[in-house]
Amino acid sequence: MPDTSAKFEVTLVLPTTEERIISVRTDEHIWDAALAAGIKLPALCHQGRCLTCAGRLLNGGQVDQSESVSYYPADRDAGFVLLCTGRPLSPLRILTNQQEKMREHRRRKGLPAPYS
Ligand code: FES
């Protein structure tokens, strides 16, 4: 049973290269915590399917993607995360707005890449 009171610091590196540090509970989706902090990141499905909310881990770290409808070991290996359904399991540093890069990665691997 995860400790729902636990929180991790998540640094979001935005396209403007501006960095925002937010605190995210382990039972909270990173996208929702960003919105609560006034940071509106891209998203469409909010189910972990469309890749619109994709980010990329810059310094490793762990994200729980068990609530994502479509997430593959190859995504994890390449450092891609889906912020709409991802919950932090460690401190994180994430480059946001990576939807095109993640779709390209999926196409290369022969995996579903919606809206490509
Ligand atoms: S908004 Fe669709 S995968 Fe996150």
Image (cartoon, rainbow, N blue to C red):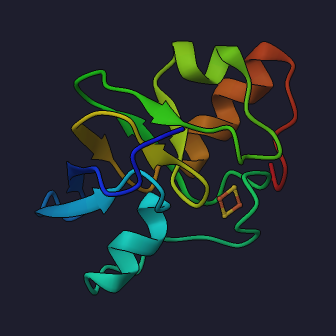
Q: Is residue 90 above or below residue 53?
A: above
User: Is 13 positioned to the left or the right of 2 in the image?
Assistant: left
User: Is 19 positioned to the left or the right of 114 in the image?
Assistant: left
Depth check, front residue: 2 or 91: 2
Q: Is residue 23 visible?
A: yes
Location of residue 57 in the rendering, given as x and y in whole percent from the top left corner: 35, 32
Q: Is residue 10 above or below residue 34?
A: above
User: Is 71 positioned to the left or the right of 27 in the image?
Assistant: right
- Which residue is drawn at the image coordinates 40% and 27% (left, top)? 62
User: Is 28 positioned to the left or the right of 102 in the image?
Assistant: left
Q: Is residue 11 above or below residue 18?
A: above
Quarter of the figure with residue 89: top left
Q: Is residue 25 above or below residue 60?
A: below
- Which residue is drawn at the image coordinates 61% and 70% (left, top)? 43
Location of residue 54 in the rendering, given as x and y in whole percent from the top left corner: 54, 49
Quarter of the figure with residue 50: bottom right
Q: Is residue 14 visible?
A: no
- Which residue is drawn at the image coordinates 46% and 35% (left, top)? 63
Quarter of the figure with residue 45: bottom right
Location of residue 77 in the rendering, given as x and y in whole percent from the top left corner: 54, 12
